[in-house]
Image (cartoon, grey):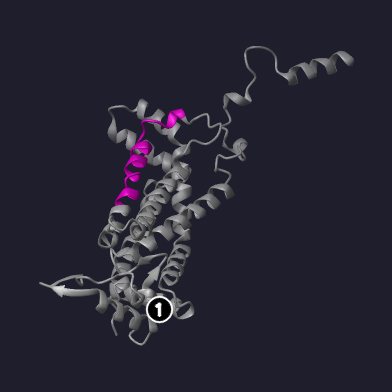
Amino acid sequence: MNLNPWDLLQDALGALLAFFYDIIPEYGLAIILLTLTVSLLLFPLTLKQTKSMRAMQEIQPEVKKLQKEFKGEKEELNKHLMALYSDRGVNPAAGCLPLLVQMPIWFALFRVLRGDHIPVDSDLNQVLETAQNALYTTIDGKEVLREGVDITAEAFSHVTFLGMNLLVRPSQAVDFSNIVGAIPYILLILVIIVAGFYQQVQTTRKRANDPNADAQKNTQMAGMQNAMKIMPVVFGFISWNFVAGLGLYFATSNIFRVGQQAFILRSHGTDGGDGKGKAAELSPDDPSDEPTSSGPSPNASKKRNRRRKK
């Protein structure tokens, strides 16, 4: 019995994909169902990531104060930052955790979507094996598309979804002399990039009426956000050069995570859309809670009126 974790992961993904194909014999839908299953299993990590990124934003004013106070004292600054993170229950590395966990899944899925690790007695294995043999040939040890093969032919209907042959790379399929045929693949890449960027916007946009929004600029958080912004482009590039089935996984995962994050942020009152939960976010010394110097507070006037009536 093979107990290699890498092989076990690929076998599990292959078996799950074949299971969904048996339920709904549509390859694209089977990939989408597999994606949703993986996303639901990773929901606890997504929850932790989203909450951590929001928490990091909220403590940025305090981080900035510490950076000013201990400017030039790196060791002392790091000690106080660690104490602040511990006190607020913030883990700066949590934002990258889902990404790190999913990386082995992406590599395993790439192999699975090529037809590897699919149960040999499954209908999906037969479909993929037939399509792969018709699409590809090996030249000098490298797998290439057969010359003159029509990737939109009826023979590949079982591996076609929304006008895309999911066993070929967009870079292979896009022919700008046939714009109509290229559109589905181009839209797939755009969905991956746009949905990826929107995920960043969800967790980094300024909250409505946030008094600390300007104080969050030019901090380590801003640097991390800028680094994360390049990731959607990276995934777009990967999807362009790998089979469209993997791109469908990325697109479905990104769209699902947009919905996940919207739910998480709203359920925790931090979506910034209607100002709900603002009272809980205000600090005890927030100036909006104190009387201004322009005159007495309304409460003080009411107390004087009550005393006069007595």
Taking the magenta stretch, the answer to whether it contains residue 225 is yes
> Where on the picture, by quarter, is residue 247?
bottom left
Q: Residue at x 61, y 39 (%)?
A: 274
Mark 1, other Cα within 10 Å: few <14 / some 14–19 / many ≥20: many
Q: Is residue 15 above or below residue 76?
A: below
- Does residue 20 sit above or below 216 in this rendering? below
Residue in front for this viewpoint, 283 or 75: 283
Q: Residue at x 41, y 76 (%)?
A: 16
Q: Nearer the viewer, residue 7 or 251?
A: 251
Q: Main secondary structure of the magenta part?
A: helix
Q: Nearer the viewer, residue 113 or 210?
A: 113
Residue that badge 1 annotates: 18
Residue 172 is situated, as x and y percent measured from the top left of the image, at 25, 62
Q: Which quadrant is the C terminus positioned in?
A: top right
Which residue is drawn at the image coordinates 45% and 78% (left, top)? 25
Q: Is residue 124 magenta?
A: no
Q: Is residue 230 left or right of residue 204?
A: left
Which quadrant is home to the N terminus? bottom left
